[in-house]
Image (tube, rainbow, N blue to C red):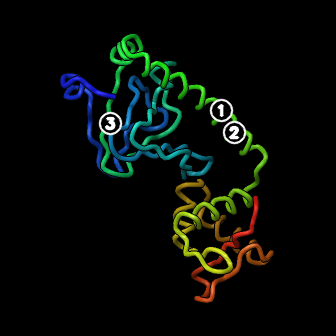
Amino acid sequence: MRLLKDVYDKHVKLYAPGAVIFQEGDRGEELYIIIEGEVEIRKSTYTSTSKTLICLCAGDIFGEMSIIEKKARSATAVATKPTKLLVMNNALFERMIEKNPDFAKKMIKILSGRVRRANSILQNVMVTNKENQIISGMIQYAHDYGTPTYNGFRINVDKFVNWACDHLGILSEDLHGTIQDLLRKGIITYSALGKSEIVIKQRRKI
């Protein structure tokens, strides 16, 4: 999407890694389009931790529900890389909807996609217990950060626990307890390097 210089100068903002763009519960009057960088959308859990719902990159739009519904933010947005955003207030949003049919079509697709994804998340939460949630997280982490071996993927236990606390919203003690249960069941095993690493079997299905 091409921007006029006056729009760019007035509405584009830069965020450093770790910067909070908005907090869950804040009153929101803008939506955001990522020009460069990466943003995580995080949701607080019943504990003091949070769960990462989605990671967004260049071209993605977020925060649109607050500007449409005039309600508080339902999640927290955090920049994870140096990030450049187009911050669109209600006046600019309405102008873009009116003057740019491609932008209007993209908003319709995004909103319908949000509804489908929300339904999927709710269904997953209702039918998935904590053990399966942790196993699914292990598989995701193993494919992203693990070391492939003949038997599966090796992952560092402490690094996975730190990642899972942030991304799954589960307490460290619960993670360690579930890991011990999975070891006893033979679902995972220690690697040849000792108890600092576990092996996620490739054939494991959830």
Q: Which residue is mark 1?
A: 116
- Inter-mark Cα distance, 3 to 2: 28 Å
Quarter of the image with the N terminus is top left
Q: Which residue is mark 2?
A: 120
Residue 120, by quadrant, is top right
Residue found 70% across the figure and 80% down from its top: 189
* Numbered mark located on residue 202 in the image: none
Total of numbered circles in the picture? 3
- Inter-mark Cα distance, 1 to 3: 25 Å
- The spot of residue 69 in percent (x, y) is 51, 19
Q: Earlier in the sequence, mark 1 or mark 3?
A: 3
Front residue of 56/50: it is 56
Q: Which residue is mark 3?
A: 85
- Inter-mark Cα distance, 1 to 2: 6 Å
Q: Amino acid at mark 1?
A: Arg
Q: Amino acid at mark 2?
A: Ser
Crowd class of label 2 (few under 14; some 14 to 19; many from 20; radius 10 Å): few
- The spot of residue 64 in percent (x, y) is 47, 26
Front residue of 88/18: it is 88
Residue found 57% across the figure and 74% down from its top: 155
Front residue of 205/88: it is 205
